[in-house]
Amino acid sequence: DDEIDLKELISVLWRGKILIILITSVFALCSILYALSLTNYYKSEAVLIIQRTSQEPASLAGLGGLASMTGIRLPTSGEDKSMLVLETLKSRAFLKHLLAFENVLPSIMAVKSYDHQSKEISFDPEVYDADSGTWIREPTKNQQSKPSYLEVYETYLGQVLIQQDANPDLISISVEHISPIFAKEFLDLIINEVNELLRSKDLQESSDAIAFLTSEIPKASLITMQEATNLLLQSKLETQMMAKISTDYILKIIEPPFVPEKKSKPQRALISILGTMVGGVLALLWILIRHYILDGIKPDLGS
């Protein structure tokens, strides 16, 4: 009794072919309309290499104890900056810095559409007034009219993808946005500002170290201490030199950002096919459930 007759199964499906076609067609039409309603997104990508610091001079070997006592950090041999760069890119503090630039915040949080003819972004008038540059959305209990960097953070992580290659010195960064121009410009901004922030950080640290060492050299009583202090000073001067003359201080561009010509999503054909398949499967299941289960319990309900 538990066996299913193949001929009966085919017969049941054949008798319900009109309903199957109808349900499948409705799902296909709805999936096509849904796919067409989705906004196009464009992805700009860049491949970069994280530059290591210069090799530690042999003359600095053994000065780690002296440096630690003075609070000065010596570069290790080929110091790896990968973790510092990745964590900076993903940090809320870095996002807060980026949002200080003009039109970055509204282009992330208030964008509505993109005009390919004028190449301009249209903003949601219920959220942001582009003419006056003011936020007009209704504030909530925990949020102001103007989005905070904490609120923007999740959107930022959704638009900016950072991937590290098998080689830890290679990373790829991509920005996805409805405006291909903003995607490229925002990626340029991210790369430039990471370089500038880390450059400024190293310049400040080395300047502080140089000022301290310069004041300490005359105080050193032993010749060996004076020599060690001079070597530390030389190391920090080299850091200053590299930070000032290097255009790509930490991130060196291998493949620069570009203005994408083709959309990255949505995949409308795939959405339409999957929607049609779901409709067909549901139609088949409904026909089978109605025949083998619902029709089978009708006599019991009547009695």
Image (cartoon, rainbow, N blue to C red):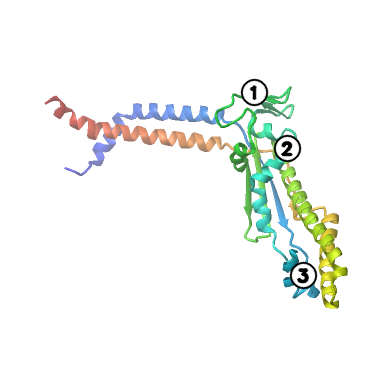
The foreground one among 108 and 23 is 108
- Label 3 crowd bin: few (<14), some (14–19), many (20+), radius 10 Å: some
Q: Is residue 30 left or right of residue 230?
A: left
What kind of element bears circle 2? loop
Residue 187: x percent and y percent? 71, 43
- Label 2 crowd bin: few (<14), some (14–19), many (20+), radius 10 Å: few
The foreground one among 85 and 187 is 85
Residue type at numbered disc 1: Ile
The disc at residue 56 is 3
Residue lying at the far left in this picture: please name it.
Answer: 303
Mark 1, residue position: 136
Residue lying at the far right in this picture: please name it.
Answer: 218
Disc on the earlier residue, 2 or 1: 2
Q: Is residue 260 left or right of residue 1?
A: right
The foreground one among 300 and 72 is 72
Task: Evaluate whether residue 259 shows in this view.
Answer: no
Please tell me which residue is depicted at 40% across the width and 33% down the height of the picture: 279
Mark 2, residue position: 100
Disc on the earlier residue, 1 or 3: 3
Is 246 located above or below residue 54 in the figure? above
| Residues at marks 3 and 2 touching, judged by CB atoms closer than 8 Å | no
Kindly indicate the quadrant of the structure image that contains residue 245: bottom right
